[in-house]
Image (cartoon, grey):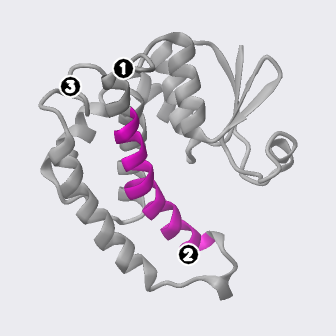
Amino acid sequence: MYRVIGTAKSRALRVLWMLEELGQPYDHIPANPRSDGVAQFNPAGKVPVLIDDGTPITDSTAILTYLADRHGDLTHPAGTLDRARQDSLTQFLLDEFDAALWLAARHSFILPEEMRLGAIKNTLRWEFEASQKTLVHRMSDGPYLMGERMTVPDLILAHCLDWALSARFPIVEHRLTEYLDRIRQRPAYQRAMAR
């Protein structure tokens, strides 16, 4: 059985949600970043950590990719053009959405107060809005990013959109608002959010 370390108010939500989508049993330890329960598995103190057969795996995207590949679901097969497109979307979301939100969080409450640059958040919001315009041109016409099939980048995007709203980063593209509304109806998403 898998063990997931990290609160559902962090990127650990992505892992919890994927396990719910896959129907895999897991134990959840809702530890905060840099707590003793985390640091013993990840010296950087970051969450999430997935423990599989005694081996810790860190970084939410690495965990999602591992689980998708291991269970043959929520992904396209490695070495295919669809997988290349999937990986391209994943990298775009990490570079343009996740990175902006993480940098804003660091300058809001993570860094020591004397190291924070509050004005950077205006630039990050502007970049986040520009990235939304780029993404909608890359989205398929289906209910998910790549069409009829939900894949790893869908979990990352939905988490980032939720994160954006809580961080007061506006979602300016109507297609993304509709997308998030659809995703939030998924039973596995709702179960993960209830953690």
Q: Where are the magenta residues, as a range?
A: 87-109
Mark carried by residue 70: none
- The residue that label 1 is drawn on is 80
- Which quadrant of the figure has residue 131? bottom left
Q: Magenta stretch: residue 92 in it?
A: yes
Q: Which image quarter is the C terminus in? A: top right
- The residue at the point 16 percent across, 33 percent down is 140
Mark earlier in primary sequence (1, 2): 1
How would you rate the neighbour count of disc 3 (Cα within 10 Å): few for under 14, some for 14-19, many for 20 or more? few
x and y percentages locating residue 61 in the rendered image: 54, 38
- The residue that label 2 is drawn on is 107
Whether 132 is drawn above or below 61: the answer is below
- Which quadrant of the figure has residue 59? top right
Asked whether the viewer can see residue 170, the reply is: no
Q: What residue type is labelled 2?
A: His
- The residue at the point 38 percent across, 72 percent down is 124
Q: What residue type is labelled 1?
A: Thr
Q: Which amino acid does label 3 sit on?
A: Gly
Q: Do the residues labelled 1 and 3 touch (CB within 8 Å)?
A: no
Q: Magenta stretch: residue 96 in it?
A: yes
Q: Are marks 1 and 2 in contact (CB under 8 Å)?
A: no
Q: Is the magenta region chiefly helix, strand or loop? A: helix
Mark earlier in primary sequence (2, 3): 2
How would you rate the neighbour count of disc 2 (Cα within 10 Å): few for under 14, some for 14-19, many for 20 or more? some
